[in-house]
Image (tube, coloured by chain):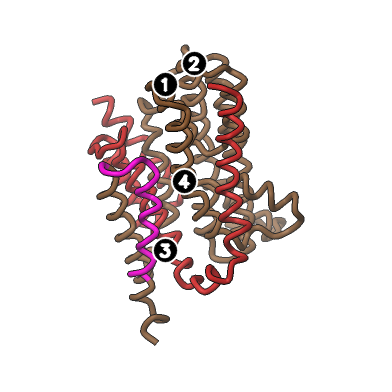
């Protein structure tokens, strides 16, 4: 129920925070995990914190420390992590319309292009909401990810496993919540079903990150079933 | 881990993000592909749902996450508030893991 004293902007921010809030909490828990694992696998505390601040794409960070901890070469660790980060290029293209404003603002926006900010931005009905959703989610997730990382790196071994709390299931649920309204249109349903199927089939046979990149091929059958293609 | 690695990884990760957000949209080739780009979110989001539900150490694992995500899917289809959809999944998953 909108309150009479609220402007549409405030209502929009409230809506975005309701989505980004739970995502931010789950991200914080995984930031803690990253901090704990990185320090446990020999990365210094300051390097761990720097990775979350400047690399800021969780899956790539986990991949890098995982390969190094498993005895892989730095080149292998870097390649795996960047392959995983390549999906951010597709995300950037998808949310390109939100990158308006001065140079500094656009450069900062690029840093915030991650799974969660893209998911919230693309779920919005109009460009103004997409822009607000992107910034609210990007800044909130950036904050909780880095606070979590610092806590994990500094206070490490005393902290439990977020998987025991079921928090690993919060991420697919969040993405699901954002995609379901889209699936009510046939071409988007085709994109979603085929994209999901492609990703599932590729999980056991490709390096991490590739299933999500390959799923983008589903836009072609989706386009073929749309009105535009039939005209 | 060396500082060169930290800097290299951060620079590479940022370059990929900036490529998509700031460079690719300016290419005319990409402009012509705009009708295709409209379907990217649905494909990417469902891929993230699938990977987040089934992926474990590079292979497929059917575990407590699936029950949590199915519960979230039912909630989403019933048009439950988005917070409910997100919170129900870890709740169910954690309960299943307790059993």
The boundaries of the magenta stretch are: A204-222
Q: Is residue A71 above or below residue A9?
A: above
As helix, strand or loop, the secondary structure at mark 2 comes to loop
10 Å crowding of disc 1: few (<14), some (14-19), many (20+): some
Which one is closest to the eye, mark 4 or mark 2?
A: 2
Residue at the spot 27% in from the left edge and 35% down from the top edge: B64
Residue A141 visible in the current orientation = yes
Q: Is residue B47 above or below residue A163?
A: below
Which is nearer the N-term, disc 3 or disc 1? 1
Callouts 1 and 2 on one subunit: yes
10 Å crowding of disc 3: few (<14), some (14-19), many (20+): some
Residue A63 visible in the current orientation = no
Residue A182 - label: 3
As helix, strand or loop, the secondary structure at mark 1 comes to helix
**Which color is chain B depicted in?**
red
Q: Which chain's residue wears label 4?
A: B
């Amino acid at each position: 129920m909108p309150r009479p004293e609220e402007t549409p902007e405030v209502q929009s921010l409230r809506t975005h925070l309701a989505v980004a809030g739970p995502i931010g909490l789950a991200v914080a828990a995984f930031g803690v995990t990253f901090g704990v694992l990185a320090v446990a696998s020999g990365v210094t505390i300051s390097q761990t914190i720097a990775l979350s601040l400047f690399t800021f794409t969780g899956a790539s960070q986990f991949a890098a420390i995982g390969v190094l901890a498993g005895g892989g070469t730095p080149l292998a660790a870097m390649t795996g992590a960047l392959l995983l980060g390549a999906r951010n290029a597709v995300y950037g293209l998808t949310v390109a319309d939100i990158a308006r404003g001065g140079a500094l603002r656009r450069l900062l926006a690029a840093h915030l292009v991650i799974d969660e900010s893209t998911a919230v931005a693309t779920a919005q009905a109009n460009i103004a909401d997409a822009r607000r959703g992107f910034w609210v989610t990007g800044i909130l997730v950036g904050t909780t990810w880095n606070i979590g990382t610092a806590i994990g790196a500094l206070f490490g071994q005393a902290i439990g496993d977020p998987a025991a709390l079921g928090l690993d299931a919060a991420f697919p649920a969040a993405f699901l919540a954002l995609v379901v309204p889209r699936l009510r249109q046939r071409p988007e349903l085709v994109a979603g079903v085929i994209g999901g199927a492609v990703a599932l089939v590729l999980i056991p046979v490709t390096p991490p990150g590739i299933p999500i990149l390959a799923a983008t091929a589903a836009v072609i059958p989706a386009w073929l079933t749309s009105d535009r293609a039939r005209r | 881990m060396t500082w060169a690695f930290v800097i290299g990884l951060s620079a590479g990760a940022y370059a990929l993000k900036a490529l998509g957000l700031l460079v690719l949209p300016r290419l005319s080739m990409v402009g012509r592909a705009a009708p295709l780009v409209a379907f990217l979110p649905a494909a990417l989001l469902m891929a993230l749902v699938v990977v987040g539900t089934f992926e474990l150490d590079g292979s497929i694992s059917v575990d407590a996450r699936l029950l949590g995500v199915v519960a979230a899917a039912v909630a989403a289809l019933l048009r439950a508030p988005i917070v409910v959809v997100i919170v129900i999944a870890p709740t169910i998953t954690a309960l299943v893991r307790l059993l």
